[in-house]
Amino acid sequence: MTLQLAPGGALASPLVAEMLDGADCGLDDGAVIGPYRILREIGRGGSGVVYAAERIDGAFDRRVALKILRADGVLEDRQGLIARERRLLARLEHPGIARLLDGGTAAGRVWFATEHVSGRPIDRYCAEHRLPAEHRLRLLRQVCDAVAYAHSQLVVHRDIKPSNILVDANGNARLLDFGIAGALDGCESDEGVRGASAPRFASPEQLAGITPAVPSDVYQLGLLVRCVMAGVACADRRGLDAVVARATRGDVHVRYASADALSSELAALSSRRPVEALSANTLYRLRRFAARHALRIGAASAIVLAFAALAAFHVVHLDRARRIPEREAATSRRMGEFLVEIFGASDPLRRQGRPFDLGHLLESSRTRLDRVADPALHGMLAAALGRVHLAVDDRGNALHLLQQSVSTGAADASLSPVDLGRRHRWFARALMFAHRLDEAAVELEQARRLVAGREGGEGVLVEVLQDIALLRHQRGEGAAALQAMREAAAFASEALDEDAPERLAVRFNLGQQLYVADAYDEARVVLADLYDSVSQRHGDLHPTATSAAAILAMIMAKLDRHEIAARWADQVLSSTAATFGEQSPRMVLAMRLQGAVAMSRGDSTGAVRWLRRGLVLNDALPSADDIDSVGILEKLGDAYMAQGDARAAEAAYREMLKRNADGGRALEPDFGQRRFKLALALDRLGHCADARRLLDDARRSAGAGAASALPESPSPPLERCGTAASAVPVTGTVPPKRR
């Protein structure tokens, strides 16, 4: 026997038709119906009125939602049916369903009492909280799971719509209107239940007067997905549209077979996996593979992402092979063969149980690249592999590969100036990472000349102008860096769409440069505006919104608005965990921010706790990053010094310098301030010879690094060893954005 609830949650059988004929169910506050006292009206519909009510007979002490239906002269014949319906519906024990508590008749009325849910309809809740796609999909999966459970109990809802789903104070979706109406089964007439009280959410079979069943609920769930996800940015909009289209197909046999199947598709969208609705589309699946790995920052994911992108490129070119010159089609085929070989090296069967070795895979890719004879293909692959090596901090091979890509590109007449400019720009970035700044400046200027004024080159030009600004910052030319970033931002605002990634990046970098220049008020305006615009369009989990929130936290800390700073830092922590996972490199940076904000309000104990957590997480990750850990160790040493623990500070500072031995493994440029901090710790411990030696080294670095361009912050003299140290600035600036 399958229990089926009529649209609107009403008992839309002849029983209800008789009960509702010309009736007005309104009751005054304080009225008593059965064992309940009416508190206030909270909703009204075609099937009756819903009230907040309280139990007055002492059976249980809780507030309920009481729905009153009108009945005239038919109660005696229907008491058995009402009791049976109540028993059946009471079996729905699920956290996503507002549970039926009681039901009966009184004063000529039928009433049902359900658990009272305080919340907002799901569509309004999502809009009011500006929820991003990931959070909306989570709520929709909760609804699907609740409906699937009801189906397992032989209950069909048939009135799934936003107003019947509330999101409670804990942010969880609760399905209403189970058990506040009657039931139909094979023993009862189906007359009167085939229509829908809400035509917008009615299934075709309901509109046609056919008894709805599980496919009708699936159809209405599909409409609910469309409603809730409307107007929100989704990483896989094509997949989402395909899921909605399949769920709402007119043919019940083509729809998803169950609410569980639809929930699985929503889970695939959340995790950026391909959906079954598009399973036959190979290019789509490759793109979802790339998107799924794009959120991971580890070394292995960098190479997988680059190869997945190349694979997508290869498929596109093969698909168009009949419409492009044979040479390009052949190049595309050879690229595909190259990728197959590379991917094959990571096949678990070929590894025969050996662990995945990224270094071996990269070495193998370089060896295979050397055998590629076609110059165009060689240059294309060298550019991609160079970026992969740069991402995993293999600077030597990155420089070699990117230089190769530039050389082959210059000799390739078929390569557009914009594409060649893009290669020069990446080669310049590799040179910047290697601190070969003069050579980097030459490459950036060459890139600028190649792309300036070219159609389709606006985005690359914005990136080049940003890199010029960051290079000047790396040289310690703070004022020139800020001016260059302003020029890049001005050009981006004129040449690019507001949502263009390059424009978002330059707005962020401008805010960051303003912060570095101590222009806190202007930086706050720029970054707050960026945060608002990005979160409105893409949700507050977007990486650019999170990055803006991080700098806003530091700005508020600088302005001594510590409570607001803490809220921004908490936002960064929660967004990072939701987007990248709690065991990710990005969480290391979020914990470092927590430590810095704690230090700003004088909470050195809290700072130590957060910074140690960040360091432990960083060192436990497969892609442990010295660049991130150098900054954490520096802040940790600062926190220990604030606690008066010079010995612990010494250990932290020494480890910091050890990991940054080449001077390039840190986000923030080193102009001597790190050795100066160790000198201060040694001074407190009375190790004067080492303290003075480090102080001299710091002074030499400060002079060579154009430290005078940094914000002045005179430091105190060495306390115990008696040597003045005011010539060395100690900066607390935020570094250039990493990519």
Image: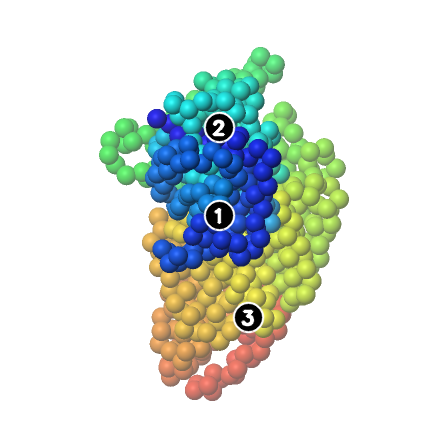
Identify the residue under disc 1: 66
Rendered location of residue 254, percent (x, y)? 47, 19
Left of 441 or right of it: where is 595? left
Taking the spot 66% from the left edge, 34% from the top edge, the residue there is 418
Find out whether the residues at labels 1 and 3 contact each other: C-beta distance under 8 Å.
no
Kind of residue at badge 2: Ser
Identify the residue under disc 3: 562
Q: CA distance from mark 1 to mark 3?
A: 47 Å
Left of 91 or right of it: where is 390? right
Identify the residue under disc 2: 13
The single residue placed furthest to the top in the displayed view is 322
Kind of residue at badge 3: His
Q: Is residue 289 visible?
A: no
Rendered location of residue 397, percent (x, y)? 45, 42
Rendered location of residue 284, percent (x, y)? 50, 26
First in sequence, mark 1 or 2: give its number: 2
Q: Secondary structure at mark 3?
A: helix
Most foreground residue, 211 or 111? 111
Most foreground residue, 568 or 240? 240
First in sequence, mark 3 or 2: give its number: 2
